[in-house]
């Protein structure tokens, strides 16, 4: 894949449709490849030309297994050096790196979470990633597109559907959302005709309300 986040449900659908394994890659709009999977395993960082650091909010390295901000240095960018550049992405390094069957001694990423905007800190202090929501809605094909707008004590879910969604679908999705988030939040469902993309043209699943 290339250009946008590859979610588990998308990977399964593509693999079934083409009867072939799906290999995910991770690159930057600044024009270079950062890491790539070998089938569905970890992402191997292409360390001959890029250094990847995973840092916390204080620019300190996070322990393996914890989510951190992706900061990259491109070693072979001779015309325009890229040194410790924060991409605005989040990723996790494996607590125990996988032994490569081909002897690839490259650093590994367990998963690429997505953009920093793909994370919401709940009122109870839990870190909720975009995967929490995609994991719920992948089971509801009647909901063709959705976006979540969180506030201090509620979630507004805007959704797009070409047909009327049966009430049982929203009730089932509400139960899954409350279970996944693990907190008592008011849920409001709003059917819309369109859901705006982010300025980059990519879907924005978690959207912040405008502040006064």
Image: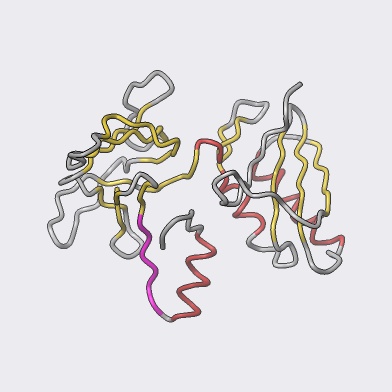
Relative to 203, is 174 on the left or the right?
A: right
21 or 73, which is in the foreground? Answer: 73
Residue for point 35% across, 57% down? 25
Relative to 209, is 48 on the left or the right?
A: left
Which quarter of the picture shows residue 172? Answer: bottom right
Measured along the vertical axis of the image, is residue 163 above or below residue 160? below
Residue for point 81% across, 37% down? 186
Measured along the vertical axis of the image, is residue 15 above or below residue 160? below
Which quarter of the picture shows residue 170? Answer: bottom right
Residue 76 position, x and y percent, is 17, 42
Measured along the vertical axis of the image, is residue 172 above or below residue 129? below
Q: How was this image coloured?
A: secondary structure
Residue 200 position, x and y percent, is 54, 46
Residue 28 position, x and y percent, is 37, 46
Is 115 part of what is drawn in magenta?
no
55 or 210, which is in the foreground? Answer: 210
Residue for point 40% across, 33% down? 68
183 or 79, which is in the foreground? Answer: 79
Q: Main secondary structure of the magenta part?
A: loop
The number of callouts visible is 0
Range drawn in magenta: 20-25
Q: Quadrant of the C terminus?
A: top right
Relative to 48, is 25 on the left or the right?
A: right
Residue for point 60% across, 45% down? 198
Residue at the extreme top: 58
Residue 61 position, x and y percent, is 31, 26
């Amino acid at each position: 894949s290339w250009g946008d986040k590859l979610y588990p449900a998308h990977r399964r659908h593509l693999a079934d449709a083409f009867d072939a394994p799906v290999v995910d890659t991770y690159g930057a709009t600044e024009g270079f490849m950062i890491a790539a999977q070998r089938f569905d395993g970890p992402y191997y960082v292409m360390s001959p030309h890029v250094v990847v650091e995973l840092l916390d909010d204080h620019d300190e390295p996070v322990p393996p297994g914890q989510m951190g901000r992706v900061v990259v240095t491109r070693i072979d960018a001779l015309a325009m050096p890229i040194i410790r550049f924060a991409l605005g992405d989040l990723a996790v390094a494996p607590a125990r790196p996988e032994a490569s069957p081909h002897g690839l001694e490259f650093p590994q990423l367990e998963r690429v979470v997505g953009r920093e905007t793909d994370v919401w800190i709940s009122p109870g202090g839990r870190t909720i990633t975009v995967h929490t929501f995609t994991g719920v809605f992948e089971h509801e094909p009647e909901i063709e597109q959705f976006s979540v707008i969180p506030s201090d004590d509620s979630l507004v879910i805007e959704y797009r559907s070409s047909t009327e969604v049966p009430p049982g679908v929203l009730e089932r999705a509400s139960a899954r959302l409350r279970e996944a988030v693990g907190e008592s939040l008011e849920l409001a469902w709003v059917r819309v005709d369109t859901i705006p993309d982010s300025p980059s043209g990519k879907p924005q699943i978690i959207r912040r309300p405008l502040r006064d």
